[in-house]
Amino acid sequence: MVSFRQALIEECKIRGYSERTQASYFNAVNQLTTYYHQSPDTISDEQLAAYFRSLSLERGLSSATIRLQLNGISFFYKNVLKRAFSIDIVWPKRPQRIPELLSKAEIKRIVLACQHDKYRTMFQVYYGCGLRLNELIHVKVGDIDGARRTLRIHQGKGQKDRDVVLTDSVLRVLREYWIRYRSGEWLFYSSHIVRGTPVSETSVQKAFRRAVKLAGITKQCSIHSLRHAYATHQLEGGMPLNQLQQQLGHSDIRTTQRYLHWLPELNNGAKDLLAGWGVSDE
């Protein structure tokens, strides 16, 4: 499997795939071989079909998760083993529910309940810019352009760079954070001892869950709920859909349109979502 892994990584690198995609594809193939205890080149199409049925019937995985597995495995078979396969997959249907939306007041309570300056700042930037978590933790000091009021996102989802607009409030929060911590390369570094690496996603997620609990929020939410709230609140404030698409980094505007399900009506005038918070004051 070692040689197969190396071949898979090389094929991903040739196409410019991110390390996360490389890891995702390898994990998909590794789970398949672990399931059958066989080398992947000896697994038949019939076994592949049975494996994908097991993902739904035995493990109860969602269609999105199964599709991730299929992407990785089909890429491996096509580009490493040079073998095409065609199988019928029954995609499980799950109830379509609109996620619970955090209100502006609830987000402010979560931010104020956070007891650590670094994570409090991260929550504000996450919500104030609509970033993805992976984008947030990989922000470098040099990515912030105060003169242009933009944040450069390098190789976001889909391996695309983009500039995100920084509002006055977010820019002020970032400046105050930098003055206090004097970050090195990574804006949100792992620790005072280990400044050469960005903070981990797990640490941010744990901090968010603690803040939600302290704030007394009972809605089902995660750190990604801040991005959902940003998108919905900006649409509510009047931000054009194509502008929101750019800010969020969506390649297809239909993905951005999904946020309209929270908005029975739209008002006018995009707003600075952090304006008037005063959350950075001690």
Image (tube, rainbow, N blue to C red):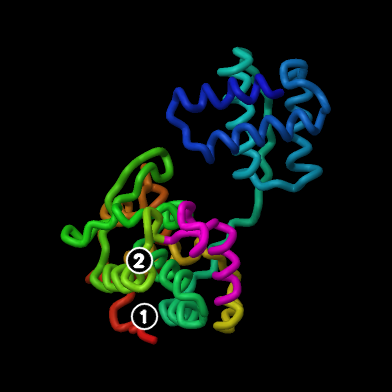
For residue 154, above or below residue 41: below
Q: Amino acid at mark 1?
A: Ser
For residue 28, above or below residue 246: above
Q: Earlier in the sequence, mark 2 or mark 1?
A: 2
Quick check: is 210 in the magenta stretch? yes
Residue 113: give x, y in percent of width and height: 51, 82
Q: Nearer the viewer, mark 2 or mark 1?
A: 2
Does 133 sit left or right of 36 as displayed? left
Q: Residues within 10 Å of mark 1 (few under 14, many from 20)?
A: some
Quarter of the figure with the N terminus: top right
Whether residue 232 is visible = no
- Residue labelled with disc 1: 280
SS type, badge 2: loop
Residue 277: give x, y in percent of width and height: 34, 82
Does 151 sit left or right of 113 as displayed? left
Q: Quadrant of residue 50?
A: top right
- Residues under numbered marks 2 and 1 in contact, where contact means CB atoms less than 8 Å apart: no
Disc tally is 2
**Residue most toward the top?**
82
Q: Quadrant of residue 36?
A: top right
Q: Amino acid at mark 2?
A: Arg
Q: Quadrant of residue 132?
A: bottom left
- Residue labelled with disc 2: 182
Label drawn at residue 235: none
Q: Residue at x 58, y 24 (%)?
A: 8
**Residue most toward the front?**
193
Question: 182 or 104, which lies in front?
Answer: 182
Q: Which residues are magenta?
A: 188-211
Q: Residue at x 39, y 86 (%)?
A: 282
